[in-house]
Structure formats: C-alpha cells, structure tokens
Image (tube, rainbow, N blue to C red):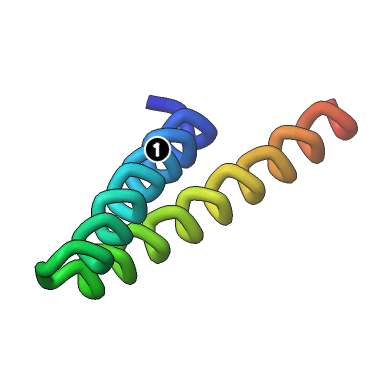
C-alpha cells in the first residue's frame, strides 16, 4: 500500500470513528473517547497524506 493510500485509509477511518463518537456523545453512551480517537486518526491521516504529497512533488522536480 502506498503512503498516500495509507493516509486516505486513516482519514476515512477517522471520519467514521468521529461520526460514531459524536453520535454516542449525543446519545447516552461513552462517546468522548471514540470522538477523540477519531479526531486523532483524522489528523494523523491528513498529515501522512500531506507529507507524502510533498515528497512526491520533490521527487518529480529533481527527477
């Protein structure tokens, strides 16, 4: 799996976990840990995807 694809997978999982955490937070249930974990996954996925794009652009310019 390529690095941009891994970032996309992390962002997708983060979006689903954040949505589920928000629903559980509104409804009676322990949704805050899931909400925080989802937001963290979303952030990490965004960073991985952005850094991999930056590396790809450097390789294209030099090669």
The residue positioned 50% from the left and 60% from the top of the image is 43
Residue drawn 53% across the image and 33% down it: 4
Left or right: 42, with 32 as reference point: right
Q: Position of residue 8 (x, y in %)?
A: 47, 35
Where residue 41 appears, x then y in whole percent? 38, 56
Q: How many marks?
A: 1
Looking at the picture, how far across and down is residue 59, in whole percent? 76, 33
Looking at this rendering, what residue extends furthest in the right direction?
61
Does 2 sit above or below residue 15?
above
In which quarter of the view is residue 63 placed? top right
Task: Find numbered disc 1 in the image and state the secondary structure of the residue it sits on.
Answer: helix
Q: Tell me the residue that label 1 is attached to.
A: 12
Q: Residues within 10 Å of mark 1 (few under 14, many from 20)?
A: some
Placement of 5 over or under 13, stated as above or below: above
Asked if 31 appears above or below 52 in the picture, the reply is: below
Q: Quadrant of the N terminus?
A: top left
Q: Residue at x 57, y 55 (%)?
A: 47
């Amino acid at each position: 799996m390529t690095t941009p694809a891994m970032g996309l997978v992390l962002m997708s999982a983060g979006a689903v976990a954040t949505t589920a955490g928000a629903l559980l937070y509104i409804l009676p249930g322990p949704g805050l840990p899931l909400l925080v974990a989802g937001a963290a996954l979303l952030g990490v996925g965004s960073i991985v995807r952005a850094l991999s794009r930056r590396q790809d652009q450097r390789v294209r310019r030099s090669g």
